[in-house]
Image (cartoon, grey):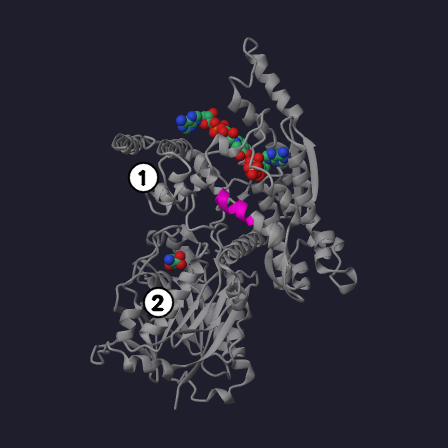
Amino acid sequence: MADYLTIATASLRQLPFDFKGNIARIIRAIEQGYECGSNVLLMPELALTGYGCEDNFTFQEFHEAAMAALQDVLKAAQTLGQDQQPMLISLGLPLLYPGGQVYNASAIFSADGLHGFSCKQFLARNGLHYEPRWFEAWPRGQVVQHPHYQVPMGDLVIDSHGVRIGFETCEDSWISNRPGRDLYQRNVDLILNPSASHFASGKFDVREQFILEGSRAFGVVYAYANLNGTENGTSIFDAGCMIASEGRMVSYGERLNCQEVLLNHALVNLSANRVTRILSSESINIFKAQSDITLPYLLTTSTPPWQVTEQSLPANDEMNEFWDDLSHDDRIHSEICYALANGLWDWMQRTHTHGFVVSMSGGADSGLAATLVYLSHYLALHQLGANDYRQALPTIWLDDIPQYSDELGDYTHWLHQYVMPKVLLCLYQGTDNSSAITFNAAQAVSENIGANFQHWNVQTIVDDYIELVNQIYPERPLNWKDDDIALQNIQARSRSPGVWMLANRENKLLIATSNLSESALGYATMDGDTSGVLSVVSGLSKTRIRKINHWLEKQGLPVEGFHGFHRLTIPAMGQINVQQPTAELRPVEQTDEEDLMPYIICDSIMDSYLIRQMWPKSILIDLLMQGHGQVYSLEQLGQFIERWFRLFCRNPWKRYGTRAGFHVEQISLDPKTFHRFPLLNASFAEPLEQMWAYIRAQATEK
Ligand SMILES: Nc1ncnc2c1ncn2[C@@H]1O[C@H](COP(=O)(O)OP(=O)(O)OC[C@H]2O[C@@H]([n+]3cccc(C(=O)O)c3)[C@H](O)[C@@H]2O)[C@@H](O)[C@H]1O
Ligand SMILES: Nc1ncnc2c1ncn2[C@@H]1O[C@H](COP(=O)(O)OP(=O)(O)OP(=O)(O)O)[C@@H](O)[C@H]1O
Ligand SMILES: NC(=O)CC[C@H](N)C(=O)O
């Protein structure tokens, strides 16, 4: 008779140090686990405390609070599990070994109490991750007794009457020597993977690959649970739990959804997975000594699935079909918009502020930043439903926002009429260099997204500053020939105080609009257009922003609506898309690309430097291999690279002082979390000279 098991995986929207809130969400997941008849419930890595507690992970008082929280969860599990079938629960948490170090662990428990702790073996130390700063890696195959809890901790295998369960914790599964290889030798049936894996464009596919491959090669059911939402304000965890069996995905959890607890489950056949191991060319060493935890009760059921109740059947996977049906670019753009919208939703919820202010230029970056605020509310409305969405808005607004009902018309109309004008204030701030084109674009996009659009002119403020400086230097008044940068920057800086004042008055968050390409080069005025709390598009290159804006205008964001699937387009984006990016800071026409270089080149150089970690000469060869040599001469490409490195090395202090921003692409320029770079440096003079020597040698050869 086959062995069946119902497995549930839960995504939780946790918050660092929010012990009460985190426990409440954990308890909701346990309740839902019982409701769907689960035998095993997996929750994400460090879900008890939040993944982003950073340096508090080494505070002893933090651990006392975490231990108290674990006791609360164990008590709740005991109560909830009364008169229920046994359910094994795994919950990620930081674990201090008394008198020793801290481990990134998962508590394994049931209604009968705590059974043990599984510990992570490979600590994430690349990109955004700094786990070795706080945690100790657990050695493969070792198990010890935890002196306080008196249960085993380490590289555990749990055995429940022959059903064997092992662990890979997040990064463990991303490396070649993954613990699953040994778990295969330990005859494991089910691998649980508690994860805290942040969103980055295209990353979901990598997770899907190692989950499927784990299930296929190790002959196991593989369950994966990820956190949800932006815990620390910059990384966005994108949920997306998965369960694979017999090398096929049998259940997908929702992704990029702003609900607090998302649970999915699947009924799996363990015996069918064992077939892979029986038939495998790699024999299992059954004589190897094992240190397993034995559970006194049976987790599995031999009930054939046709007797299983409707409730315990896996949820359908409409959400995954939703993503799967999208073409490549469509999916990348959709994921990015969903992720940023999700992050913005959390910022508003968790800061308890009253929405956002955007200084709106009628250009691509501020246009997308404002639109993303709209998308965050549009999606939250659909994901939470009109009532819960309304309840999540600041209470001081509720008197003015009626409950949604059909009589109020379309829900989009309701959102535009009653909610968006409160959520988002867009402000156009003209100078003598501003044009009607940018004003009209700023107004059109603001209206399209239902924001409160305002405008004023800051030229008199600019003139006052010029006058003040001229009073100090009457012999040489400021002029465009000699003082180009000073006269540009005073305009950007004059826009900052007024918009900050509105943010203060309205208790709103000021959004900064720098993008990744501009941050690399410092192409922004410090304390001018860099002003703000949160830089929404700072994780996106200019090339990406322009593509997304075109896609929002023409194709639109796919949304699973109340009445089925639809696309949300932003037609007014067309007024931005027809323009060349311009700072509009000079009296004569100015484009970013003339000031800098073509964005496509700038972004290619940035990718080669940051993703492939190349220096100038290799980057030049890379640009040639991408075909840019057909458009530009070697000399021109050399100049672009030189300019890029000179600006990159001149402006790291700007990146250092830049606002918090979301991580979106594979790479980022945030010096505090991603690319650390010295503030003082030799500007890559020698590598640039080597590049020029190569270019000269090529010219001589010709
Ligand atoms: N070698 C060096 N290494 C490190 N720091 C150096 C430095 N030389 C000057 N500095 C410091 O940097 C300061 C200059 O920095 P900052 O005042 O920010 O100005 P800066 O970087 O010189 O100029 C701003 C640039 O951003 C462009 N911009 C501004 C605003 C908006 C947009 C847009 O795209 O919309 C573009 C503008 O066209 C201009 O090219 C100097 O006053 C000095 O204090
Ligand atoms: N006329 C303006 N009114 C309000 N804010 C402005 C204005 N001009 C510039 N800004 C602010 O300065 C930022 C940088 O200016 P910039 O002209 O680069 O606009 P952008 O949105 O980045 O678009 P693009 O560079 O594609 O033209 C803008 O995002 C905006 O926040
Ligand atoms: N928490 C982790 O171990 C994260 C590392 C992993 N490579 C990821 O980004 O998903």
- Percent from the top left, x then y, of residue 297? 39, 84
The answer as to whether callout 2 falls within 8 Å of ligand 3 is no
Residue 73 x %, y %: 47, 69
Amino acid on which disc 2 is placed: Glu
543 in the magenta segment? yes
Q: Residue 280: which quarter of the image?
A: bottom left
Image position of 37 (left or right of 127): right
- Give ligand 2's quarter of the image: top right
Extreme residue in the front direction: 702
- Residue 425 is situated, as x and y percent measured from the top left of the image, at 67, 43
Say whether residue 417 is left or right of residue 165.
right
Q: Against 129, is 90 above or below?
A: below
Q: Which residues are magenta?
A: 541-548
Amino acid type at circle 1 is Trp
Residue 194, picture quadrant: bottom left
> Would you name the residue on which mark 1 appears?
615
Circle 2 residue: 168
Q: Is residue 422 visible?
A: no
Q: Residue furthest bottom?
A: 1
Q: Give the residue at x 43% y 34%.
A: 653
Quarter of the image with the N terminus in it: bottom left
Query: In the picture, which quadrant includes the C terminus?
Result: top left
495 versus 399 height, above or below: above
* Residue at mark 1 to residue at mark 2: CA–CA distance: 36 Å
Q: Which mark is residue 498?
A: none
